[in-house]
Amino acid sequence: MNQLSDPEDEFVALSGLELERLHGVMHAALGVRRRTHFYLWAQGRLQGLVPHEVLLCAHGDPSRRTLAFERFSSIPLPEGDADLLVNPESGFAVQAIRAWTEQGNRPLFVAADTRDETLYRRFESTLFRHRFENFAVHGTLPLAGGPGTFFVFAQLAPSSPARLAYALDLLLPQLHLTYARVVSNEQAELPEVPAAERLVTAREVEILQWVRDGKSNQEIGDILAISPLTVKNHVQKILRKLDVQNRAQAVARGIALQIIRNSA
């Protein structure tokens, strides 16, 4: 197994500093209401217990393929790489969540020096492409009709597997509640987003549908007999009109606003 060590198998005691940091994480989470707040919280207080460079969050039901993704990064990522991280069909985040499910829904850590070589090889090319040395994933499954939430931490600082597992288990309830609150707040505001003059055009809807299906700008251009640059310009307009930061968020917002249908 390539799971992180079970906290029950190895005793982990938090230091006084770590307990202080945990209290800081929980206290600061109370003020998180929007995506920008979550970003500052993840890149601030949360770093004290789980140092990382990239955090990929998802909410929804993986069994129904209804996951929507967000990316919070302290390092710049090329646009194409960023889209690959959160592609809802085959991106790095959804692959990590599938592996987590297969391994029993417990904290999962993947790196070159971990115990399960087979699982590392499964992600080796993806890690190499994004220049990640490791990643960890944990989450909560959907319950009583509510969405599940999932968190993929990439490029983690060195830590013992037992300590990282314990930290993820401790933080998971706070991560879930905080991220669910952000998603709920933003979804509640969705009806106010699309003023008539900001609605996407028929051509933009068509392009957004192909983006939903995981097509690149080149592929969409070939399908629609237009240049990849024209496709890119349309995509940028879609992002502005839907007030989102990347293609995955545009798809999720488009589905929520019923501009396009979920591919499932």
Image (spheres, rainbow, N blue to C red):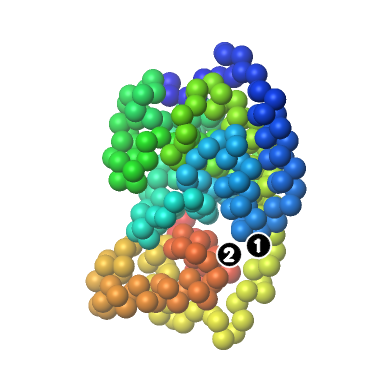
- Neighbour tally class for label 2: few under 14, some 14-19, many 20 plus, Cα within 10 Å: some
Q: Secondary structure at mark 2?
A: helix
- Neighbour tally class for label 1: few under 14, some 14-19, many 20 plus, Cα within 10 Å: few
Residue 233, quarter of the rendered image: bottom left
Q: In this view of the protein, which residue sits in the foreground, 103 or 178?
A: 178
Q: Percent x, y for residue 18? A: 65, 29
Q: Which mark is residue 187?
A: 1
Above or below residue 60? Residue 198 is: below
Q: In this view of the protein, which residue sits in the foreground, 162 or 143?
A: 162
Q: In this view of the protein, which residue sits in the foreground, 255 or 151?
A: 151
Above or below residue 248? Residue 43 is: above
Task: Let me know if residue 172 appears in the view.
Answer: yes
Residue 81, quarter of the rendered image: bottom left
Task: Let me know if residue 139 appears in the view.
Answer: no
Q: Residue at x 46, y 63 (%)?
A: 246
Above or below residue 199? Residue 99 is: above
Q: According to the image, label 2 marks what residue?
A: 256
Task: Please name the amino acid that badge 2 sits on.
Answer: Ala
Q: Give the total of numbered labels.
A: 2
Kindly check if marks 1 and 2 are in contact, taking CB atoms under 8 A apart as contact: yes
Tag in front: 1 or 2: 1
First in sequence: mark 1 vs mark 2: 1
Above or below residue 217? Residue 158 is: above
Q: Percent x, y for residue 121? A: 30, 31
Q: Residue at x 53, y 37 (%)?
A: 51
Residue 83, quarter of the rendered image: bottom left
Left or right placement of residue 102 versus residue 130 in this view:
right
The N terminus sits in image quarter: top left
Q: Residue at x 54, y 42 (%)?
A: 151
Task: Please name the amino acid that badge 1 sits on.
Answer: Gln
